[in-house]
Amino acid sequence: MSNYSSYIIPASLALIVLFGYIRDVKVFDCFLEGAKEGLQTAARLLPALMALVLAVSMLRASGGLDVIVKLLSPAARLTGIPEEVMPLTVLSPISGSGSLTMFESILKTYGADSFAGRVASVIMGSTETTFYAVTVYFGSVGIKKTRCTVPAALLGDMTGYICAAFAVTVFFGR
């Protein structure tokens, strides 16, 4: 039996063009208009994203990340989050690539089957890069005042971290 999955994208494109032809829609013109809007959105988001990348780089290079982790260590012990995972919890809401790098470091240092590795894995699979998401989604529609979005999202992230440590403890032990 042959693999039909390689035909899905070309078939989808053909159906879109056919549907546009039936409805008398100029598909290519619509495509160009959408591409133009996408480019304008990307241009509006670029300064905020560059600032976010710069802030993460400065945080890591300056040792600020280590200071923040040290300050949060008592809270980590209280909530059951391993201290080895704390850098990931700090970077996760800010930077996807930074948290991915930290996650990889945790797995290399402690192992995927360690408590820290398992908690980090659950965190990576269940939390969002909050500031990136707020920047992209709010920025794409021009919202400047996020009101309670960031505190609520960070509270959700914190809940995810605590639940990750709890779930790994319940299902795998310490």
Image (cartoon, helix red, strand yellow):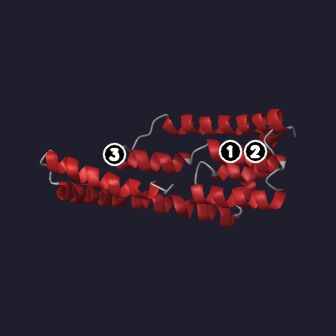
Q: Which residue is mark 2?
A: 119
Disc number placed over residue 143 in the picture, else none:
none
Mark 3, mark 2: which one is toward the viewer?
2
Mark-to-mark CA distance, 2 and 1? 6 Å
Q: Tell which tag, 1 or 3, sits nearer the viewer.
A: 1
Residue 125 position in % (x across, y down): 64, 45
**In what element is the residue under mark 3?**
loop
Mark 2–mark 1 CB contact (< 8 Å)? yes
Q: Residue at x 70, y 43 (%)?
A: 122
The quarter holding residue 163 reads top right
Left or right? Give the position of 171 relative to 29. right
If you read the primary sequence from the N terminus, does the residue marked by circle 1 or circle 3 appear first?
1
User: For mark 2, does the 10 Å Cα neighbourhood hold few (<14), some (14 to 19), or many (20 or more) residues?
Assistant: many
Dividing the picture into quadrants, the one containing residue 33 is bottom left
| Residue at 41%, 41% in the rendered image | 145
- Judge whether 26 appears above or below 155 on screen: below
Amino acid carrying label 3: it is Val
Structural distance between the alpha carbons of marks 3 and 2: 35 Å
Q: Is residue 112 above or below residue 58?
A: above
Of marks 3 and 2, which one's residue comes earlier in the chain?
2
Residue lying at 83% horizontally and 46% vertically, measured from the top left: 115
Q: Is residue 71 visible?
A: no
Give the quarter of the image for residue 9: bottom left
Q: Check contact, mark 3 vs mark 2: CB within 8 A.
A: no
- Where does the image place residue 79, in percent across and percent down from the top left? 78, 35
- The three-letter amino acid code for the residue at tag 1 is Ile
The residue at which mark 1 appears reads as: 123
Residue picked out by circle 3: 141
**Spatial CA span between label 1 and label 3:** 29 Å
